[in-house]
Every structure is written in structure tokens, then in C-alpha cells.
Amino acid sequence: MNENENYDFIDILKDNIEVYDFYLEHQPYPYKETRFRFTTKHIYDPNKVAKKKIINELKSQLPPSFKTRDFRNFIGITFLQFGYPYLASHPAAIKKYQIVLPKVTKPDIDKLAKLYLDCVKSCVVNEDCIFYQETIQKIHTPIPFVKIRVELTPKDIHKSMIADHLEILKKQDKPPVSKKKKK
């Protein structure tokens, strides 16, 4: 396969990707485990209020004609970026020049991602199992925020690209030489 054919695949993919960008102007909410209250015998979900707020913010940033995507028809990629405010212990020069620093303390990125992907699931797609790649970043910045990017590609595009790619590979390969037995 030559380089031009490879770019054709990338162009086909780019033309068919649905991209949804969300920007939430609040400090990221950490995910908390669901608990059972023995006194009242009820399940307590500490994320309920946070989920409602996040879902409302996400829905407000979707186009008015948007319909939730069926997970059987799409595959997706997510990018999550969590911005936390600088700590008091950070040097003044870092704050002055607004240098982005990695955040290496709690909460864990997997717990952050879980809460926000659950909210994306209820707004954009009806199942989060379609995501085959996640990129998560936790940083210190001047202003707290959450950025979410969801890229959805129809499954049939991937299937046709794979079929085309296999055809090209088959053309490049020489057919196996069969040895006939002499009698």
C-alpha cells in the first residue's frame, strides 16, 4: 500500500466522524461509591446531584435537533481533560505565567472518568461500551474546568475501510505457488 492510499482512508474517516466538544466551567466532581444505608434500608448515590448538574450542562451544549446515538451503530473515542485550580503551595511565578502543571494527587483519573462518562452516556450515546480509546488528563490551571470531546464513527464506515484495506493487501501479496504432483 502506498502513502496516498493510506491518506484516502484517513480522509474517509475524517469526513464521517461526528465530534461533540463540551466545556464545563466548574471544578471536576470526584466519583463517590454508591452506599447502602442500613438505618433506612435505601441505596444512597452521592453522585446523584453532581450527575444532574453535569447532564444539564452537557445537554445545553448539544445542538437542539440532537438525538442520542444508538451504540450498535457507532464506535467512539473520548478525550477528557480535568483542570484544577492552582494550590496555595504553588510558586507565584507559576501562577503569574499560568504554567500548566500535571496534577498527581487524588482524585484518581479512573474515578473522574467514570462519573463523566456516565453523564456522556445519558446524553450522547446510550451505552459507553462503544468507546475503544480514552485519553484522560488531570492538570493544574488558573481556572478550573472540564473538557470533554466525543468522536463517533459509524461502524459501517470502519467495516468498509477494513474490507478496502484487505483488498489492497491481497493485491500486493503474490498468490501462493501451488505445486502439482507429477505422475
Image (tube, grey):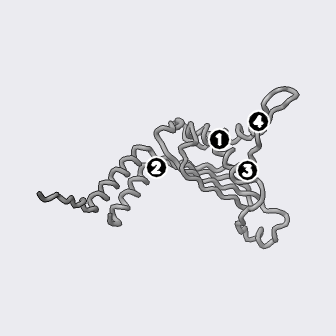
* Residue at the limit of the structure toward the top, as seen here: 40
Tell which tag, 3 or 4, sits nearer the viewer: 4
The residue under label 3 is 28
Q: Secondary structure at mark 1?
A: helix
Q: Which mark is residue 119?
A: 1
**Which comes before the other along the chain, label 3 or label 1?**
3
Q: Are marks 2 and 3 in contact (CB under 8 Å)?
A: no
Q: Are marks 3 and 4 in contact (CB under 8 Å)?
A: no
The CA span between labels 2 and 1 is 21 Å
Tell which tag, 4 or 1, sits nearer the viewer: 4
Rendering coords of residue 168 (x, y %): 30, 58
- Which amino acid lies under the numbered mark 3 shown in the image of this protein? Pro
The residue under label 4 is 45
The CA span between labels 3 and 4 is 17 Å
Position of 145 compared to 167: left or right? Answer: right
Q: Secondary structure at mark 3?
A: loop
* Residue at the limit of the structure toward the right, as seen here: 39
Rendering coords of residue 27 (x, y %): 75, 51
- Which amino acid lies under the numbered mark 1 shown in the image of this protein? Cys
**Which comes before the other along the chain, label 2 or label 3?**
2
Point 19% across, 60% down: residue: 179
Quarter where residue 59 is shown: top right
The CA span between labels 4 and 1 is 14 Å
**Which comes before the other along the chain, label 3 or label 4?**
3
Position of 157 compared to 35: left or right? Answer: left
Q: Which mark is residue 17?
A: 2
